[in-house]
Image: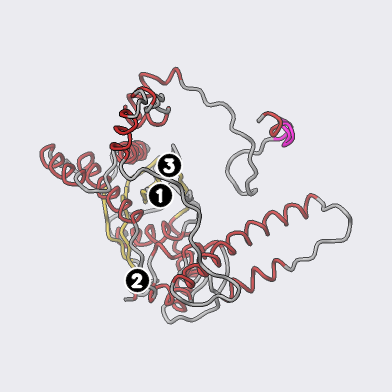
Amino acid sequence: MAHAILSPSSAERWIHCPPSAVINAEAPQKDTVYTREGTLAHAVCELKGRRKFLALSTRSYNAELKKLKADALWQDEMDGYTDAWIEALEEIAGEYDVLPHVALEVRVDFSEYVPDGFGTADCLMIGEIAGVTTLNVIDFKYGKGVPVSAEENPQMMLYALGALLDYSQIYDIEAVRMTIVQPRIRSEPDGWGLDANTLLAWANVVVEPAARLAIHGGGEFQEGDWCRFCAIRGSCRARATANLAAAAMEFRLPPELSDSEVGEALALGQRLKTWLSDVEEYALGACLDGREIDGWKAVEGRSQRQWSDAGAAFEAAKAAGVPEEMLYERKPVTLAGLEKIMGKKPFAEALGGYVTTPPGKPTLVKADDRRPAITGHITAKDDFEEE
């Protein structure tokens, strides 16, 4: 069970909050339509990768792809997104001096630092870039809710650590790169790198001590961004204490907040909003389970009318004298929709000249966001008046 307790996917949480590892390992695991959809997309990525890099025959490829497309969760857009994965791999492979060693769905072992620690990397590439032996760990994310950054990503770093240890007998790896391909959110892969010695130092100084605590449920509970998928995120006392303490922050006395205080208030508000949402989710679940949350209850929310049988309803409408042309709306397909239909490259070749990307609407983000800041172009007041 140790490998489930200290999984790479939950590494950010158990490194920062060691005692949460055992609690989450013992909690019921939820299998959702999104996780199953992601599993299917990964299977398609692996199949297309085997065809591109491992000489899988066309006959075998077509037969296996047909089986995957028979899955109830298959959607045609999945074809385009998994093609984007192959395009990213091709671009990364092209950065090497010669065609690198390519491995798909590779089990990597980092149990030297984490008890029974292992994971499965979607793709590894090893070879020389400008004469430097470089390992690149590439991961496919099919989710479209939360962008995942490769920078200092513990899951990716553990995959890289395992690959570095596994391949050290064959290659003298000097540099490590990590790349995340998340085509439903980003049009371009997100990458980050460090040297092999720095990765090993991180494993010694950060990973090993945290793993030693986490495997036995030791250490202190700590609140942070890693709480997002924790099983007790809505009822954790340490998280509640941290957020309630933050809410008690006293602003200084001048009648108007300073710009610095506004920044503090925004950060505090986002933190409290996320925590409150998780508490509400926990309380709703408790009420639905028959437990009592003092002062609260679960009720049926608002609902919208819908057809029980749209086809029969439309036939009845026509019988009642409604012209058929009034029952349907003709709308042009969106730019993104047409790109999915045609494929990224054919779309760019045929229609790229007709595509423009105007500046996006100004939006407020945290200072560590990678997008460049804009100033002096438009005020919030101007922006609202345009709408």
Judged from the image, the secondary structure of the residue bearing numbered disc 3 is loop
Indicate which disc, 1 or 3, sits on the residue closer to the N terminus: 1
**On-image quarter of the N terminus:** bottom left
Image quarter of residue 114: bottom left
Asked whether the residues under the numbered discs 1 and 2 touch, taking CB atoms below 8 Å apart as contact, a structural biologist would say no
> Residue 128's x, y, as percent?
35, 44
- Nearest the viewer among 207 and 293 is 293
Queried whether the magenta region covers residue 170, the answer comes back as no
- Nearest the viewer among 22 and 233 is 233
Asked whether the residues under the numbered discs 3 and 2 touch, taking CB atoms below 8 Å apart as contact, a structural biologist would say no
Residue 342, relative to residue 183: is it above or below? Answer: above
Q: Residue at x 53, y 64 (%)?
A: 278
What residue is disc 3 on?
189
The figure's colour scheme reads secondary structure
Q: Given this view, does label 3 or label 2 mark the residue nearer the observer? A: 2
| Crowd band around label 3 with a 10 angstrom C-alpha radius: few (<14), some (14–19), many (20+) | many
Label 3 amino acid? Answer: Pro
Q: Residue at x 31, y 51 (%)?
A: 37
Indicate which disc, 1 or 2, sits on the residue closer to the N terminus: 2
Q: Given this view, does label 1 or label 3 mark the residue nearer the observer? A: 1
Label 1 amino acid? Answer: Gly
Q: Give the CA separation, mark 1 to mark 2.
A: 22 Å
Indicate which disc, 3 or 2, sits on the residue closer to the N terminus: 2
Q: Residue at x 38, y 76 (%)?
A: 26
> Residue 189's x, y, as percent?
43, 42
Q: Which residues are magenta?
A: 375-382
